[in-house]
Amino acid sequence: MAVVETTFIGASVATENAWHNAQQQFDDAAELLGLEPDLRDVLREPKRELSVHFPVKMDNGHVQMFQGYRVQHNLGRGPAKGGIRYHQDVSLDEVRALAMWMTWKCAIADLPFGGAKGGVIVDPHKLSAGELERLTRRFASEISVLIGPEKDIPAPDVNTTPQMMAWIMDTISMAKGYSVPAVVTGKPLSVGGSAGRNAATGRGCMIVGMEACRKLGIEPSRATVAVQGFGNAGSIAAGLMQGKGFTIVAVSDSRGGIQNRAGLDVAAVIAHKQRTGSVVGFPGSEPVSNMALLELPVDVLIPAALESQITASNAGEIKAKLILEAANGPTTPDADAILAKRGITVIPDVVANAGGVTVSYFEWVQDIQSFFWEEDEVNAKLERVMVKAFNTTWDMAKKHNVPVRLGAYLVAVSRVADATRVRGIYP
């Protein structure tokens, strides 16, 4: 089984602490909202953290130990929701940050979920299909004390796939003695997945990008785009935006990048990557490094890889007018300040990539009802949610004369804070 590659390892990841960045972003919003100190303390920390060490039998018969995490940041608005990633650089602080960002993302989309995230420290590309299945099933067993349709619903994330979600669903179902399709989302259609889920993150990014371009007066037919991270979200966003008239001039994956100022045929690049394992070497293109891609003279930049790619060290060199964050946390707070001073608009991750969790919500609803929707219905509902989330965020930012990210946080934090106040502290 092939593992879908969705990221690359940027040079800046190791030097930035995603959790500290996430807390700083929250602090900025809490200060502007005048949030009471006690409530700040509650929302600033995760509700629950589970760290597990678990054995997996490898193909050679030896047992290898792995470490994984599941963090629930907040449950004030409903069950926790968030993906599981497999990556050698997974850390508890990273998972904490991702869980917090999921809380805000769900609140901005007005979904009845809180935020969670999970991860296993592993390079999945070094494991066989059988080893990946055994690892996934064992990790599911270890976190089964937390997950469930009414408690915490995982989904795919970096280097995890619909097949892995099916293994998790089956593992939990075997323990229960009956099928529990709503325990995870992002599953194959044959076991309760939703039509439109695979493309949802990229489609949502395209929808938000179109809305942002209208606000900024950017004409798609005359606009160029660079995409850092040509996995599921990045490749689908690129293809859909090309269909809207944008010229995709550069893309990259974990092995490097390619560029062509006249434009790349996205479908052909996808086919090339499927054949060779990378976009590198695509005919008619020139090489470009992952970090150099960020500084290309384009109208729209889509960071769709890992967090902390745009930092204080390179924010001054960004030339795009608009940044659409298809990845989680690709821009650090220091970089945000530099970009804002330079007049570059950043549509933050909690808005730009909320399409995935939105259709995950649709999948969860369909599983609970055992009643499924056609893809055009899913896409129409997704567009309504994304346009509303974008406009609510944009209007809040303009009202307070702040960057779009802070506008998004003002919306999200106020919604979660309201739910926390109303529910109160038990006992």
Image (cartoon, grey):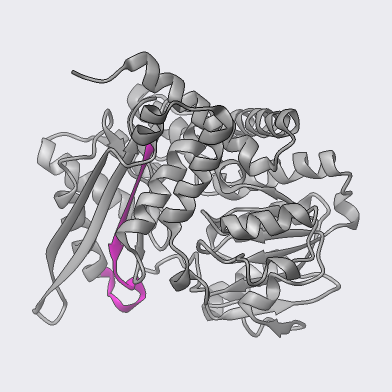
Compared to residue 396, the image places residue 24 above or below, namely below
Q: Quadrant of residue 317?
A: bottom right
Task: Please name whichever residue, 42 or 287, is drawn nearer the observer in this view of the structure.
Answer: 42
In the image, residue 316 sits, relative to residue 352, either above or below, namely: below
Q: In this rendering, would 349 be left or right of 372? A: right
In front: 14, or 387? 14
Task: Examine the structure image and report whether residue 125 is included in the region drawn in magenta.
Answer: yes
Residue at the (62%, 82%) spot, across then down:
280
Instruction: Locate residue 386 relative to residue 83 in the image: left or right.
Output: right
Whether residue 375 is visible to the viewer of this picture, yes or no, is: no
Residue 289 image offset from top left, x and y in percent = 64, 81
Disc count in the image? 0
Identity of the residue drawn at 43% across and 37% down: 103
Which quarter of the rendered picture does the N terminus lie within? bottom left
The segment highlighted magenta reads 115-129
How far across and down, in percent of the image, does residue 229 sit?
58, 66
**Residue at x 76% of width, y 39% of height:** 211
Decide: is 59 above or below 300: below
**Above-or-below relation of 74 to 287:** above
How far from the left and from the top, in percent, is residue 183?
A: 28, 37
Residue 69 appears left or right of 73: left
140 lies left or right of 247: left
Q: Quadrant of the C terminus?
A: top left
Q: Quadrant of residue 80?
A: top left
Report the residue that reaches farthest toward the top.
422
Residue 151 place in picture, x, y as percent: 26, 32
Task: Assess whether residue 153 is covered by the magenta stretch.
Answer: no
Regarding residue 26, the answer to whether it shows in the image is yes
